[in-house]
Amino acid sequence: MYQVIARKFRPQRFEDVVGQEHVTRVLCNAIELDRLPHAFIFSGPRGVGKTSVARILAKAINCEKGLSRNPCNMCPICEDITASRAVDVFEIDAATHTQVEKIRDLIDNSRYTPTIARYKTFIIDEVHMLSRSAFNALLKTLEEPPPHVIFILATTELAKVPVTVLSRCQRYDFRRIPMDDIVRRLRLVANQEQIQITDDALVTIALQADGSMRDAQGILEHISATGKGSIGVDAVEDALGLVGRSTMRDLVSAIIKKDAPSTLDVVDRVYRYGQDLNQLYRSLLEQFRNMMVLKAGYMNVTLPEEEMTFLKDLMTDISLEEIHRYLSVLIRSEEDMKYSSITRITLETILLRIISAPRVVDLQNLIHTISTRTGPLPSGHVQQISSVDIYKRPPSSLPLSWDGFLLYLRDHDQPLYAIISSATVEQDNGNTVVLTCPSQFLADQLKKTLPELTKRAKAFLQKDIVLNVEIKEADTFENKKPKPSEIRSQALRSPLVKEIITEFNGVVKNVKPKE
């Protein structure tokens, strides 16, 4: 029966484990010194060797030849553990055994001595999936298990494991496997499986695996079934639905050169070929990230030599600040791409936003250029702008009337608007406006701002205007009850009321005086 590559080439000894030397070295020393704890917890990303190391550890402590960092893999116990049929080694998937009843059965089973092996070994995978009750039931046995029991817990989400469980286990953190190690391992597998594949194709597979050896081996097996002959980068990109390297180069070059038609043409080509635009977006993020770190002087970037040369040539005429700005726009817009129902339009909008922005000038280079300049700096004539011209920018939507002028002040000069809003308009015949204040203090404040107010009113209304200020004591207003028609007329003259009526297309039904 055919066996997949990930199972066929699963490590059977500690020295076969790739990229986890910091874990295997400590475990080997603990075995040689006979200082093994009764509970381990392995945490780390998927496909980095947690379960494989747990099985190797089970063989090392149960091998018929005794405790050894190198299990023989030939005795019946080692063979049974390798084949997952050992009666004293229990591999439990916590995702399907979350109930507390399953853990109670496990605890009852742990009380009995092992049948053949030296230890009863319980390997609980994805332990974070256990329920709270199951964790609580496991605590006592995990803290003081029988002398013939070893617990090995594995999880990809350590934060979900209760602290009470973590404190009872010896913790080992597995890391993502470096890309160079994945490429070397894939080359070994490809040679033994007689798969002809180029080094650049292996690098592409390792990049897509994201530090997971199991994912990388699964991709290699998938690619090997695509056809005969040597497998190149193009075959890997086609099989995985990735954006082609040439397409990616065309897109990055067009963005750097601010060539909008070429940029949109690349997006259209990818869309017509049925490729995933979100994948294109992620690839674009990775490319600009590579450019940013290379421009910053960080050369420990694993890329094909041809790709490295292309990026270095492309970066000669662009500053680090400019690349950082491109990447920042892409990162901030990632959520828009993720939740957009029209990804093509969203992507085109993001790219055009990047292209349309002006170039970022390197301030240090600019200062150096000015300081090393031999001749005098060019001088230009500074146009004098009158103070009245500054205010000749009224919004076209506002009417050229006193009410429109009040709305303009409210939006552009809140202090001046606060002063003038305390007064009421008694007379407005076009060129003369009489403002009435309820007290001498407010009239004095308004008279202080009268020159500035007149200047702004002339600029806004585009005609000569005279402003007069009068005083009416507050008691005069209080003793005189205005008629309902006057209240309605005054309310309808209010700029705020007019704006609300216009905005909501409303009608004033009734006006009540303020009590």
Image (cartoon, rainbow, N blue to C red):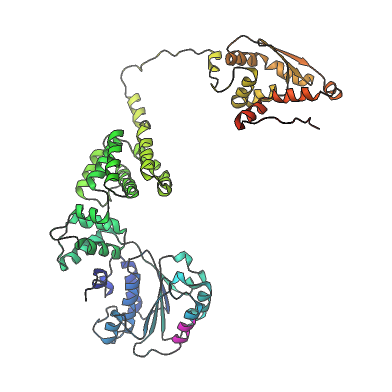
Q: Is residue 161 shown left or right of residue 5?
A: right
Q: Is residue 132 shown left or right of residue 265?
A: right
Residue at 38% x, 85% y is 119
The outermost residue toward the left is 229
Most common secondary structure along the magenta stretch = helix
Q: Is residue 446 shown left or right of residue 11?
A: right
Residue 306 higher or lower than 93, as above or below:
above
Residue 253 higher or lower than 279, as above or below:
above
Give coordinates of residue 368: x percent, y percent: 34, 28
**Which region shows up in magenta?**
104-112
Q: Quadrant of the C terminus?
A: top right
Give coordinates of residue 427: x percent, y percent: 72, 14
Residue 324 higher or lower than 427, as above or below:
below
Give coordinates of residue 364: x percent, y percent: 36, 32
Is-magenta flag for residue 5?
no
Residue 74, quarter of picture:
bottom left
Q: Quadrant of the N terminus?
A: bottom left
Residue 297 higher or lower than 2, as above or below:
above
Residue 508, quarter of picture:
top right
Residue at 35% x, 28% y is 366
Is-magenta flag for residue 110?
yes
Q: Is residue 168 shown left or right of residue 360?
A: right
Give coordinates of residue 502: x percent, y percent: 61, 28
The outermost residue toward the right is 479
State whether residue 65 appears in this view. no
Give 382 or 327, whichever is nearer the viewer: 327
What number of labels is visible?
0
State whether residue 219 appears in this view. yes
